[in-house]
Amino acid sequence: MVSTPRLVIAAPASNSGKTTVATGLMAAFAARGLAVSPHKVGPDYIDPGYHSLATGRPGRNLDAYMCGPELVAPLFAHGAAGCDLAVVEGVMGLYDGASGQGELASTAQVAKLLKAPVVLVVDASSQSRSVAALVHGFASWDPEVRIGGVILNKVASDRHEALLRDALDESGLPVLGVLRRAPQVATPSRHLGLVPVAERQGDAVDAVRAMGERVRAGCDLDALMALARTAPALADEAWEPAYAPAEGPRPVVAVAGGAAFTFAYAEHTELLTAAGAEVVVFDPLRDEKLPAGTAGLVIGGGFPEMYAPELSANELLRRAVTELALSGAPVAAECAGLLYLARELDGKPMCGVLDATARMSERLTLGYRQAVAVSDSPLAAAGTRLRGHEFHRTVLEPGAGPVPAWGMHQPERRVEGYVQRGVHASYLHTHWAASPEVARRFVEHCRAR
């Protein structure tokens, strides 16, 4: 049984202030000495970095599309174990989910799967009495979604607040917080959303602290905690990465990190470790060689386009990565990793493992995907079916090698990525908790070297 008090922070639409409120609540409750478990609905990698900074715990994703609805509560229970409170930040608008698939992967679906009360964050900057109609519509749309209160964001003045409160008095939903306009708390954005924590360092710490102070001053934390405690117990067992690996030495799996490679799900490292690997994180911006004894390499997503000159300048590491890949060692590269393995990125030399060039594009590629492995690789056997997502503003030419990594079935049919020697490189982000055999297969290939 999972009895952790919990709240889902949702909004009528994107850019309403969910991240500010959710991160601020995490920081404010953590400052009270509570162990706060941070979660994010959907595939986004960036917000969980701020959540982790606020709580001191790994930010974890709850994605009903990639992992399936049946894994949402178990993954939540895994992350929330031993915590006093869990805060779940929603995605987009409350009822927005995977395109054309109803409520699938929406914040509303996750709230129902967790039996969690929802706090609706409303951007009140251009309305007064209409806020009541808006809140009423969201609260009554799906009777299985329990909206327990409202936090008003971007409120202009005392008079504006009074008008909003008067209107909401008739809705029956309590106002649990009022936040005034505060641009100093804003976090900078660029082509894929917020700038990740790893790139901002001290500025990110200051931003999270400011969010916590703002939420503490403007929200009724006691009422929010009381609401969180109304969530009933969940009968779901916690997800576990446990696996009985083969006896023998633990192969070293090097995992790229640092400012250029910040996109990673916490469960991937846990699964690699459970499968018998010794996971060692390295920074391609700073480290001139791979960790000692590296038998396999994982290069996840991030922003190599922002650091192309620095990555290119680290010739010693590029050469080490190329030599490892050419030796046939298992290499799993997603999105940013794909670009790093290419011949060049925006004219800057990269590792040259793949005979392809990458460049920035004006077009955003974003969305969920259904994929099947085209051929055998250390990551997946031919025919393996996975769900994932793409999220980039770069273009790779050619987009697929002689032996592609994936055949895509949504939104259009195409082949994508590269499989050569031990390399599996693709734009597709996947969540290995849904297919733990991926990590096991990868580590077994590393052990066999």
Image (tube, rainbow, N blue to C red):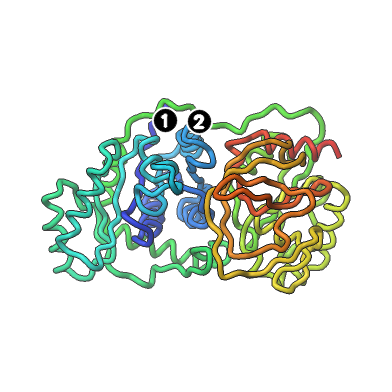
- Which quadrant of the structure image shows residue 155? bottom left
Question: Would residue 126 be seen by someone viewing this image from the given angle?
Answer: yes
**Image quarter of the N terminus:** top left
335 versus 237 height, above or below: below
Which residue is rendered at x = 78% and y = 44% of the image? 252
Q: CA distance from mark 2 to mark 1?
A: 8 Å
Q: Is residue 142 left or right of residue 130?
A: right
Helix, strand or loop at label 1? It is loop
Residue that label 1 marks: 2
The circle on residue 238 is: 2
Contact? badges 2 and 1 (CB < 8 Å): yes
Query: Measured from the top left, where is residue 65 in percent x and y?
Result: 50, 41
The one nearer the camera, 212 or 318, is: 318
Which residue is rendered at x = 53% and y = 63% of the image? 192
Helix, strand or loop at label 2? It is loop
The one nearer the camera, 46 or 49, is: 46
Q: Amino acid at mark 2?
A: Ala
Query: Measured from the top left, where is residue 195 in percent x and y?
Result: 52, 65
422 versus 180 height, above or below: above
The one nearer the camera, 297 or 69, is: 69
Which residue is rendered at x = 72% and y = 42% of the image? 374
Q: Is residue 132 left or right of residue 247?
A: left
**Image quarter of the C terminus:** top right
Farthest front residue in view: 413
Q: Earlier in the sequence, mark 2 or mark 1?
A: 1
Q: Amino acid at mark 1?
A: Val
Query: Measured from the top left, where is residue 9 in percent x and y?
Result: 35, 49
The circle on residue 185 is: none
